[in-house]
């Protein structure tokens, strides 16, 4: 029996380097003659730039170059539109892109106004402090609704309002459904901004080798190939002249993908112009303004139901706080629209959003990418409905689940991948059953909660469901080669930020080639190794790159078998051979084993002829592009104790049951879920980006912006059900964002349950002890 | 150019002498001048713990220390934990086995915080460990596997 690699809890190939300080992150790149960059960024959220005086800074010893917008000449440009407008009838989208360096006007705090290049970062920052910028402050918009109403203060002067986009989508006839309903529930919800706060800030090193005509760029990007291709175009180079290396990256979570951050456009141009390597490492304060953020929506929503809890329809209208520019198109609000429907059969759905420019940092997807907001609305509506109808919260959900025989389930609205929102597969009942069992649901309400109440403790239980569209196209690819030493190399273009790709992808290859996982070397994020690919986002790595690697591995397997048959002089057939422990051999006969490295050498002979129609070596390249995304699903459940005096919480139990199809490595999957929950928990209860009315973030440091610590994140129980995706050969679905998506409504529901105040509803995220206290006081005063 | 100060310290067991500007941060000296890039910078103000190193055996935040403050002291960075690449410290082994890291950026700080703690507290339980690492931030793992790794690491360290 051959060893199984796929589906096993295998420790990671990449860890020894990371554990011993030998892994290369962008900030670890030190090149001879390298110069360092610091930026002057706007302290105003909205202002005209009247003048920039850099005379004193330019004269400072150690300053090598200094650029304002004017100094860029013809190279001045904006970023590009990352995602165009989906084919939705009547969709309005005003494309306004961020400048490389602000010219004339700044539209959010943190926009680059000048760039200093110096011998070291200390001198660069000294010089940046000497640059005098004369601003004329303008009125600031931080609230999308007010920004829409005010046509006097325009963030983009050439538009006639601050509208960024407007999209309406319908399924069925909500108005009619509403008339037939026994109960209609209407509520308003707020889900405010968040920031990914990866432990590693962004960074770039660029080096131009004039003799070789080659630009090398190390970049903390999640989309190495796309950045390389775009940079080549901007600089007038061929793609092969640019090598983009996205080495070890200290967490991505979404915001490390943007085509293109201003710094990504600037550094390679500066390196070429000066013919010196240059480096910029974002500091934490810059990260709060210059890296994209997410969230910021206000929803007016209603749900129409029958007396027995059957959903007849949902109507949702929301305002989306887009920030100052919209390079990521409509992905976030479309995700909100499309994820709101959750696990439920919703025959009639009317959804409309208005995305608005505000004087805040740009938004782009951050783990969940708008899905949280939709899940929050739907789950909260169901909670209210359950109370009004006197139903159990688990049962109202179960009653409306899409049944297992109703897949693929088409929702008749357009998803972020431009195709009709379609759930490929799912089986929701068992997920809920398992979650109820893990959280001990019956016992909680029968015994535990009443007992706690007798002791004066406030215990509450939360239970929420969600789906996640994952693994969208267009494609990824991989090249796999058996090396002469018997190791196997795998090159893919997707990029990695800690998800364990070096191991999970190796497991896919190991399963096909019978080579132990630690003998498989993955290269990802180096465009000189593999230059086709899209990037790591939308929980697509395991699905899209995973299946590309699977396809390439199958082809290498076939080459191994064909070559082995040749070596055994045709005396065996393919099904009489096995690949075991780095060898190919006749079934059960280790005496016949040929090491794969040796076979690879024989397939690349010095003399003789490679047969027509065959290729040298044991190597193959293949690609995978799913026709549409695979829909993962899950249920989170939590028991929390709330102190009604301080509103501090103590999570007693947290359970996640999740279905992401076939699992490559359960150890890595658990880690992804744990981390997602921790981020969701941060968003729900700790992390609030506090903007003042001038567009300043008043807590833009880790002193004041509270990330959850080991004392805040509880131990989690995880369990998995497996409904394979029919859309890819491995049957995988994405899992990267699953942990984070449903935590907001879970907190809201559990805390309400714990406090037990008649009529008290939580309709906003993020919460905090202070905010909870305010909400409770407001409620009591009513 | 500001005048430099002569300093000497021990780094990962080796004596070292340097002339540094008074304003130079210790972490910048280690990373940029000694190429000890295993120590990372996450927040630049001593909150996230990624830059934690040992000074005379005790964890310190190298991003809020000046290089001149290292004068006369004994420093250990993550590069000094393992005896060799194939011979990791038991705590590193435990992190590997328990999947105590994802992107790995914060990991050196956790290792340098936990090493002296677990040496002094061989019987630390989960709650103790959560308190011990509450000054180190991790954005990937949700801490659960780090806690598991620390519990396993304590066993491994004291079995030797």
Image (tube, coloured by chain):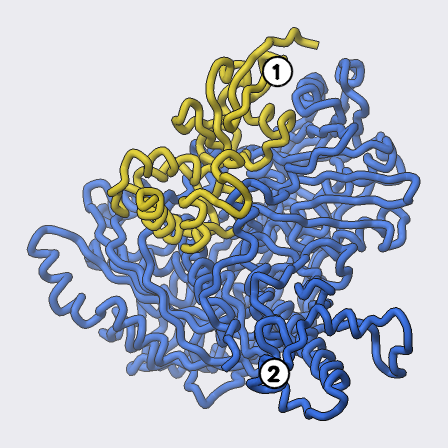
Chain colours: A blue, B yellow
Left or right: residue A751 compared with residue A467: left
Tell me the tag on residue B18: 1
How far across and how far down the image is residue A574, in percent? 67, 89
What label sits on residue A578 in the rendered view? 2
Residue at (51, 70) in percent of width and height:
A664
Please identify, in this view, whether the residue under mark 1 or under mark 2 is nearer the observer.
2
Residue A82 position within the rendered picture, expressed as x and y whole percent measured from the top left: 71, 57
* Chain designation of label 1: B
**Circle 1: element type:** strand
Residue placed most toward the observer, B134 or A773: B134
Measured Cα–Cα span from mark 1 to mark 2:
60 Å
Classed neighbour count for the residue bearing mark 1: other residues with Cα under 10 Å, few (<14), some (14–19), many (≥20): some
Q: Which residue is depicted at the point 58% across and 84% down? A: A589
Badge 2 sits on which subunit? Answer: A
In the image as oriented, which residue stretches furthest toward the front?
Answer: A591
Instruction: Decide: is B120 above or below A486.
Output: above
Depth check: give the residue in front, A749 or A29: A29
Task: Judge by depth and name the residue closer to the eye, B6 or A537.
Answer: B6
Q: Is residue B121 above or below residue A123?
A: below
**Residue drawn at 85 percent across, 48 percent down:** A234
Relative placement, left or right, of A604 versus A148 is: right
* Residue A416 location (% of width, % of height): 62, 67
Residue B114 visible: yes
Eyeballing the image, is A681 above or below B10?
A: below
Give the farthest residue toward the right.
Answer: A211
User: Can you tell which quarter of the image residue A202 is in?
Assistant: top right
Tag 2 secondary structure: strand
């Amino acid at each position: 029996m051959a060893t199984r690699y796929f589906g096993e809890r295998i420790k990671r190939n990449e860890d020894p380097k990371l554990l011993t300080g030998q892994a290369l992150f962008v900030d670890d790149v030190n090149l001879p003659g390298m110069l360092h960059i610091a930026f002057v960024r706007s302290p105003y959220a909205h202002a005209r730039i009247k003048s920039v005086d850099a005379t004193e800074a330019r004269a400072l010893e150690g300053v090598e170059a200094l650029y304002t917008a004017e100094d860029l000449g013809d190279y001045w440009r904006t970023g590009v539109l990352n995602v165009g407008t989906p084919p939705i009838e009547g969709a309005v989208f005003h494309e306004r892109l961020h400048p490389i360096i602000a010219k004339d006007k700044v539209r959010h705090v943190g926009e680059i106004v000048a760039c200093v290049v110096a011998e070291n970062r200390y001198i660069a920052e000294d010089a940046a402090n000497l640059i005098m910028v004369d601003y004329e402050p303008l009125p600031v918009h931080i609230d999308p609704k007010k920004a829409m109403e005010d046509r006097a203060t325009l963030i983009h002067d050439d538009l006639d309002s601050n509208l960024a986009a407007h999209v309406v989508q319908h399924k069925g006839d909500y108005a009619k459904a509403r008339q037939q309903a026994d109960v209609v529930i209407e509520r308003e919800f707020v889900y405010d901004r968040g920031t990914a706060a990866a432990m590693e800030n962004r960074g770039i090193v660029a080096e131009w080798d004039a003799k070789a005509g080659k630009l090398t760029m190390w970049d903390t990007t999640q989309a190495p190939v796309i950045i390389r291709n775009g940079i080549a175009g901007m600089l007038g180079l061929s793609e092969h002249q640019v090598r983009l290396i996205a080495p070890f990256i200290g967490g991505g979570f979404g915001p490390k993908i943007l085509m293109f951050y201003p710094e990504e456009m600037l550094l390679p141009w500066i390196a070429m112009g000066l013919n010196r390597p240059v480096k910029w490492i974002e500091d934490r304060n810059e990260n709060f303004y210059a890296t994209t953020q997410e969230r910021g929506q206000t929803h007016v929503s209603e749900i129409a139901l029958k007396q027995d809890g059957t959903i007849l329809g949902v109507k949702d209208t929301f305002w989306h706080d887009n920030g100052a520019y919209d390079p990521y198109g409509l992905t976030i609000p479309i995700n909100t629209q499309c994820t709101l429907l959750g696990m439920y059969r919703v025959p009639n759905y009317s959804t409309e959003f208005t995305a608005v420019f505000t004087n805040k940092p740009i938004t782009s997807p951050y783990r969940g990418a708008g899905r949280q907001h939709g899940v929050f609305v739907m789950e909260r509506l169901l909670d209210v409905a359950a109370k009004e109808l006197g139903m159990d919260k688990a049962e109202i959900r179960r009653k409306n689940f899409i049944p297992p025989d109703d897949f693929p389930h088409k929702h008749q609205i357009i998803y972020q991948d431009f195709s009709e929102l379609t759930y490929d597969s799912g089986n929701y009942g068992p997920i809920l059953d398992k979650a109820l069992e893990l959280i001990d649901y019956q016992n909680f309400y029968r015994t535990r909660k009443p007992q706690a109440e007798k002791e004066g403790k406030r215990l509450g239980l939360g239970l929420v469901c969600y789906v996640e569209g994952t693994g969208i196209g267009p494609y990824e690819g991989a090249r796999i080669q058996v090396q002469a030493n018997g190791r196997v190399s795998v090159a893919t273009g997707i990029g990695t930020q800690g998800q364990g790709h070096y191991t999970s992808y190796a497991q896919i290859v190991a399963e096909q080639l019978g080579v132990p996982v630690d003998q498989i070397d993955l290269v990802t994020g180096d465009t000189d190794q593999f230059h086709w690919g899209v990037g790591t986002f939308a929980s697509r790595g395991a699905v899209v790159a995973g299946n590309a690697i699977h396809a390439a591995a199958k082809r290498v397997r076939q080459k191994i078998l064909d070559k082995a048959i040749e070596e055994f002089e045709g005396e065996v057939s393919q099904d009489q051979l096995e690949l075991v422990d780095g060898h190919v051999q006749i079934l059960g006969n280790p005496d016949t084993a040929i090491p794969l490295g040796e076979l690879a050498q024989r397939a690349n002979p010095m003399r003789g002829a490679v047969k027509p129609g065959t290729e040298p070596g044991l190597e193959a390249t293949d690609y995978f592009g799913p026709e549409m995304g695979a829909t993962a699903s899950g249920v989170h459940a939590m028991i929390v104790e709330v102190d009604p005096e301080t509103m501090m919480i103590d999570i007693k139990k947290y359970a996640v049951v999740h279905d992401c199809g076939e699992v490559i490595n359960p150890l890595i999957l658990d880690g992804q879920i744990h981390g997602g929950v921790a981020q969701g928990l941060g968003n729900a209860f700790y992390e609030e980006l506090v903007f003042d009315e001038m567009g300043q973030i008043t807590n833009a440091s880790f002193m004041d912006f509270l990330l959850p610590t080991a004392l805040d994140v509880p131990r989690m129980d995880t369990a998995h059900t497996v409904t394979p995706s029919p859309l890819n050969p491995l049957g995988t679905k994405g899992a990267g964002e699953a942990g984070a998506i449903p935590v907001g409504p879970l907190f809201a529901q559990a805390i309400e349950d714990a406090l037990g105040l008649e009529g008290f509803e939580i309709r906003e995220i993020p919460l905090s002890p202070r905010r909870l206290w305010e909400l409770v006081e407001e409620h009591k005063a009513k | 150019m500001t005048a430099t100060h002569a300093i000497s310290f021990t780094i990962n067991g080796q004596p070292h002498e340097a002339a540094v500007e008074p304003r130079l941060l210790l972490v910048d000296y280690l990373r940029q001048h000694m190429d000890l890039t295993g120590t990372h910078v996450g927040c630049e103000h001593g909150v996230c713990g990624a830059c934690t190193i040992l000074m005379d055996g005790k964890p310190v935040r190298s991003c809020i220390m000046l290089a001149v403050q290292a004068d006369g002291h004994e420093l250990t960075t993550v590069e000094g934990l393992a005896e060799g690449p194939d011979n990791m410290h038991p705590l590193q082994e435990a992190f590997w086995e328990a999947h105590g890291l994802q992107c790995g950026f914060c990991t050196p700080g956790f290792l340098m915080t936990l090493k002296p703690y677990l040496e002094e507290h061989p019987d630390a339980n989960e709650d103790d460990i959560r308190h011990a690492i509450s000054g180190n931030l991790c954005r990937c793992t949700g801490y659960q596997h780090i806690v598991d790794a620390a519990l396993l690491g304590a066993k491994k360290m004291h079995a030797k």
